Amino acid sequence: MKNKLISGKITSIFPDDINTDDIIPAWTLQESTDRGFFAKYAFDNYDPEFVKRSAKSKANIVVAGKNFACGSSREQAVYALQGNNVVAVIAETYPDIFYRNALNNGLVLIVLPDTSVFNLGDDLQIDILKGEIIVNNNKKIKFEMNDDEKKIFAQGGVVGRVRSDLEDRLTGRFKKVRSYYKAKVISKKGQTIVEKIVSDHIGRPVYAGDKVERLPIDILFFNEVIAPPAIKEFQEFFTDIFKKHNKKAEVFDPKKIFFIPDHTVPSSSVAVSEGIDLMERFAQEQGIKCYKEGDGIEHVVLIEDGYICPGQIVLGTDSHTDTNGALNTLAFGVGTTDATYAMAVGFLYDFVVPETIRINLKGKFQKGVYSKDLILHIIGKLGVDGAVKKVVEFGGTGLKNLSMDARTTIANMCVEMGARTAIFDYDNTLEEYLKDRAQFEYRSYQPDKDAKYAKIMEVNLSKIEPCVAFPHKPSNVSVVTKLRQYMKKTQRSDSADLAKVNTLKITDAFLGACTNGRYEDFVEAAKIVKGRKVADHVNFVVIPASRKVYNRLLREGILEIFAEAGANIESSNCGPCFGKHMGVVGKGAQMISSSNRNYIGRMGSKDAKIFLASPVTVAASAVAGEITDPRKYLR
């Protein structure tokens, strides 16, 4: 055991809901594949003294409240902490993605129900194997951790198991993975959709809480943020094994892997360009499909092109991989290390079947209300940690009133309430969408009537109003008719999570992103913009989420409507959502955005304020020059 006993000092204490953008700003992610690079930018926006403070100790321990490191799947958050001599984090809860990233890299995470017992400057000794913390050589605090995780944390990672499995793959000792769409697993108990999908993949019935040592995957995709470091680690970790067997280094199945440059295209720096070049070379060597720059965002193009099918298990190197759950698919984001291992052997290791929250939809949206309003409403009710480590399963009689574009918006933002992923029932709308599109055989899934759920909710679509999320959390949700009352609430706030807002006037607007950059989003927003002009003081950036969407909008004259109104139209990419290029906001800016996150510094300056809303509300606000009710333009 490498680190069964850890000693250190508490040098930072943070509140609930610290997100990965707080830990490491998004703009840094593509600037280096060197893990050490990220240390100097740790908490750059949120806590500028963190790096200096951490430099004073060789063994820092961070304490936090609930939901520490929520948000993005970026493994660089772990590297940034480790680069500042953080040897352990103690928090009340963590999202699954961050927990797995830390586990893979040997950053020890301790879960305690109450972290208020600790103080800055406390000296701690953590005995991983005993599950015990000694505070100031005096007080003892017990913590729970399963035996497998104790061993992995103590050993510093799981790469040894992966190397052994790769040996078995190369020598033919590994049993061939079954085809889930041919499976005939019978369960004696009712199952959720996810429980059924996992059961069919591994050949035995499983239920929430069950651990699957090796979860076979059907699709694995990378963006240009994570592909370059993953390629380098694949070569570093596994090339020697291939050489040992006189074989060329090869991924587990090139037909199941996709590379999509989407976050910063066209490239904004030499580092980004070199990363994309590396992706393209590796893809050509391996026979992997690599999309062209400008083809679109990963969570859009794979669905459009029929590579995402019901019943699949899909991994992507982005937390918004949950978007694909709209297609009756088990899809979720992973970090660099999990993706690298999967690229080598085709498995996700030590997967625990999540509990499921069931949301039954009924009714139909009123005019001017859309799927973005629905998901903001739900996040506002449940909070950013309301579905931590759980799957959110959607169905009900109202599902038939939601298009596929609408469903992907809803699925996309479930991670913003801490969910592992989202998944939708299979129905006629999805079946019709897949006709002449699906590239793989598949099997559709419905939950059993007696499936066991962590929670069941009912949402009446006809009762939903247009919603807006105030900075700096997607859960700071107000209905559009009560914006001024909510603004007054913010003026009484002393929390960094709820910024003081003194005006509803905006300087910027953004229509696009993997959340709301689809055809339907632009068609509806164009109804607002047609015949009107964007307010003089507003910079309105619109970015279709794929080349196919862009070209269709171009052919139908819809982009012309936005151009005539004074919007800036850009080629398909993640754009301002990522805070990297094509509309990065400055100090004092107020932007209304159709994207999915409004964290501090997410879209540029840490002193900017981001509001989240539907495409129609974004368009109406761009025209009005302030956040406004879109329905007054739809009468």
Image (cartoon, rainbow, N blue to C red):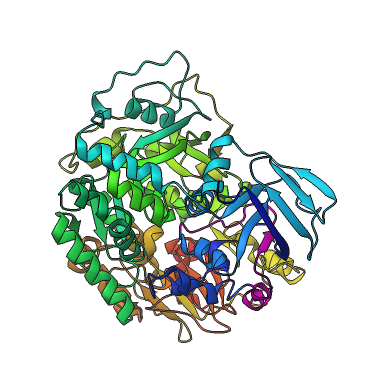
- Closest to the observer: 157 or 598? 157
Q: Position of residue 48 (x, y in %)?
A: 63, 78
The picture quadrant where one finds residue 467 is: bottom right
Give the answer, above or below, for where 144 lies relative to 468. Answer: above
Residue 403, position as x, y percentages in the image: 34, 45
Vertical side of 363 occupied by 190: above or below: above
Q: Quadrant of the C terminus?
A: bottom left
The number of discs equals: 0
Residue 252 location, quadrant: top left
In the rendered image, the vertical position of residue 554 relative to residue 181, given as above or below: below
Q: Nearer the viewer, residue 624 or 339?
A: 339
Report the side of 561 relative to 371 (left or right). left
**Left/right of residue 382 with respect to residue 414 in the rendered view:** right
Residue 498: quadrant of the picture: bottom right
Which stretch did the figure color magenta?
47-73
Query: In this orientation, which residue lies closer to the viewer: 501 or 54?
Result: 54
Q: Can residue 149 be spotted in the picture?
A: yes
Examine the rendered structure and indicate whether residue 226 appears above or below residue 400.
Answer: below
